[in-house]
Image (cartoon, rainbow, N blue to C red):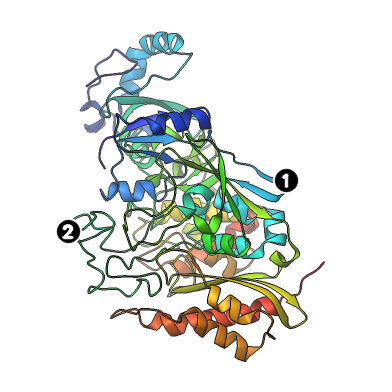
Amino acid sequence: MQPFLFSRVKNAEEAIDVLAVRTVGESRPIAGGTTLLDLMKLNVMNPQRLVDVNRALSSKIEKTAGGLRLGAAVRMAEAASHEFVARDYPVVAQALLLAASAQIRNMASLGGNVLQRTRCGYFRDATVPNCNKRIPGSGCAAWDGVNRMHAVLGASESCIATYPGDFAQALMVVDAKLEIVGRRGPRTIAFSQLHVRPAADPAVETVLKPDELIAAFVLPKAEWTRRSVYLKIRDRDSYAYALASAAVALDLDGNKVRDARIALGGVATVPWRARDAENYLKGKELNEATAESAGLQAFDGAQPREHNAYKVKLGAQTVARALLQAQSLEINT
Amino acid sequence: MLRVTAAVEIDRNAYMSKPSNPTASIVHRREFLSAAASSAAMPLLLDSTRSQAASKPVMVSPRDLIDVTLTVNGKKERISVDARVTLLDALREKIGLTGTKKGCDHGQCGACTVHVNGKRVLSCLTLAGMVEGEAITTIEGLSDITGGLHPMQQAFIDNDAFQCGYCTPGQIMSAVAVVSEGKAETEASVREAMSGNICRCAAYPNIVTAIMQAKMKMGA
């Protein structure tokens, strides 16, 4: 780990001011530290300053007019076990509980979780010279390398690193909003706008400016969010990243799909909204055949490499199964 | 290198040398710097702390040490560390509590599990500077005030729940939390809840049995 200045700030304004200082070099906010410290120990990330934002950001889960607001400093474990999250947004609770380990869930913040970085072995090895995410313009070692866990969607010769998270996909399918604070003032965006595909510059992963912080997530109030599921397929029963996963939320009229929201994990370079599959299902009856077709639609255009071709079929079947599971949920109104 | 508060030059070798009193209690098995520093430097530290009460000293250089007071097993430990020092390294190297183990140092094995405010966390991914004022419990803090074993520790012994013992402190710290989290209903839920602690010796079946046994004694 490289030496860094450590700043403890009292509130968000102070955090933004410190992050905006240009004379120090790179400043990063730290909350749970579960991604940041891991990568700093590998010398993959080397900020010159860390700003402890735990007291600067909200740790509250509160009902608002807009829905349910989760502060960015709320820990994964707390959100996962919260009564309103589990009841009204089961896909969110499941995505959180199926992620990481109990210890990490106690430490990791929601804001930090969505900003977690890829587990690509070439990215995580600072001695590997060709990694466009670490060194823009240097190439992609995984493209023709060992790529079993790498992305088949949103991938290109410049980067095929998989976005490894789960929570982000759940947020996408409940139409979550993201509250951001920064030098230019607060702004709210659709959560699905946060992540940026790596095509142009894999080093840039989100739309956040260096002085900006995620302040909160807002889950909207809607009946259909209760009919939601997160299905995660992995090598082990627990404590492993997804080989393929699907977050699904269904607005059903009997067996007919009014609206479907599907987001994929473990298979794409960013949290992946499967819009073609959603459009396919709209207005149709949901059954095994249409669920399977939707799954195939979701992976239309996938670009497999040498070791990750299994993800295309596995991913499609994961979508199909998640859709059918969501359909069969008994919802108590 | 700028020392931010205390004026005392700390002898880094002091805490690394062999203990002068081999019969010293488990907590002081290694000589560590706070024993030396606290008696000699306490008046100086108090003076500077009082005058700095308004705000924490700001680091001027990344190589400045930061002063941190950690509350470990009910006891306050004042240490001066590089900002990079993790809670794990502070516990082991600065405070002399070597029960907590470094398995992977990357949050993947669970050997470094401790409790912070009653919740299990990985000390290898926690900066010492970020847990000031929090109540930290290590494996050494599990025994009761008479030094008797915690029911979980006894259960691990009774059920042969360890072989080399390296993952064991982390397993026990996790296990105690699993019971208090209410996750020890069934063997399946125990396995799921304990999945962040790995054991190369594969003592898993006996660990699960130990937890189910201890749960009864812990009144959960």
Left-right relation of B91 to A319: left
The C terminus of chain A - image quarter: bottom right
Residue A329 visible in the picture: yes
Badge 1 marks a residue whose secondary structure is strand
Q: Is residue B71 above or below residue B211?
A: above
Left-right relation of B55 to B9: right
Sooner in the amino-acid sequence: mark 2 or mark 1: 1
Residue with the most extreme bottom position: A289
| Cα–Cα gap, marks 2 and 1 | 48 Å
* Residue shown at the point (43%, 74%) measured from the top left: A243
Query: Residue A166 in the image: x percent, y percent?
Result: 51, 63
Residue B24 visible in the picture: no
Picture quadrant where residue B199 is located: bottom left
* Residue closer to the observer: B2 or B187: B2
Query: Residue B213 in the image: x percent, y percent?
Result: 59, 61
* Residue shown at the point (72%, 46%) measured from the top left: A64
* Residue closer to the observer: A97 or B138: A97
Picture quadrant where residue A22 is located: top left
Query: Residue B174 in the image: x percent, y percent?
Result: 50, 53
Q: What is the three-letter code of the residue carrying label 2?
A: Pro
Residue with the most extreme right position: A333
* Residue shown at the point (48%, 27%) measured from the top left: A14
Q: What is the three-letter code of the residue carrying label 1?
A: Thr
User: According to the image, label 2 marks what residue?
Assistant: A129
User: According to the image, label 1 marks what residue?
Assistant: A64
> Local crowd at mark 1 within 10 Å, few (<14), some, or many (≥20)?
few
The N terminus of chain A - image quarter: top left
In which chain is the residue bearing label 2?
A: A
Badge 2 marks a residue whose secondary structure is loop
